[in-house]
Image (cartoon, grey):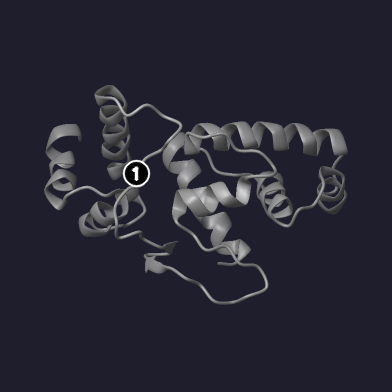
Amino acid sequence: MDIREVLQFVEQVVYAKTGQHLNDLQRRIIEGTLKRQKYMDIAENYGCSFGHAKDVGYELLQMLSDVFDEPVDKYNLKSVLERQGNLNINFGNNSINSNSIGYINVCFDQRGDTPDKSQPVTPDFQQGKYQTKIETVGKLRQFGLSDEQIAELLGLSLDEVKQVDSDFY
């Protein structure tokens, strides 16, 4: 997956969860971080101060931590993105190991959801995770995904996705 596709994925997830779009500097910070660049180099390439790039980078990583519901830093960004979107991020290799849904490229793990070992598996946690998926349905519809695509993407049944219209909207 190339950087453009990675940035599209992050943009869509961030927008779906926050209603905000990434700005140019945030996009460059993601790209630079994935390429193991230092904030000084990112700032120089973007044309801003080191301090500004570092501050924006810190806020961006905090936002991504909230969006992906796991700690994100400069050193684990690539692995978080690969895990969250089941992406195969490969710069310098044009092969894409994924299925295409609209213009969101996602590789599905047919074995089902992998449990998040950092979170307790409690009924409240499971309900919260389910509720987040239900709330995401409407936002994914705005991106033009069909109910079948949304069900597959979120690991919900087609009936559950179709009920969201009558229950929540």
Would you name the residue on which mark 1 appears? 139
Q: Quadrant of the N terminus?
A: bottom right
Farthest residue in the front direction?
117
Q: In which image quadrant can residue 91 be found?
A: bottom right
Q: In which image quadrant can residue 102 be found?
A: bottom left
Spot occupied by residue 38 in the image (x, y as percentages of width and height): 82, 47
Residue found 63% across the figure and 36% down from its top:
61
Spot occupied by residue 4 in the image (x, y as percentages of width and height): 59, 63
Horizontally, residue 120 falls left or right of residue 32, namely left
- The kind of residue on which mark 1 rests is Lys
Relative to residue 34, is residue 96 depicted above or below?
below
Spot occupied by residue 128 in the image (x, y as percentages of width and height): 30, 28
Q: Nearer the viewer, residue 109 or 41?
A: 109
Residue found 36% across the figure and 60% down from its top:
108
Relative to residue 2, is residue 43 depicted above or below?
above
User: Could you say whether the residue bearing mark 1 is in a helix, strand or loop?
Assistant: helix
Spot occupied by residue 137 in the image (x, y as percentages of width and height): 28, 44
Horizontally, residue 55 falls left or right of residue 160, namely right
Q: Residues within 10 Å of mark 1 (few under 14, many from 20)?
A: some
Horizontally, residue 157 falls left or right of residue 93, namely left
Number of numbered tags placed on the structure image: 1
Q: Quadrant of the C terminus?
A: top left
Residue found 85% across the figure and 48% down from its top:
47
Farthest residue in the bottom direction?
94
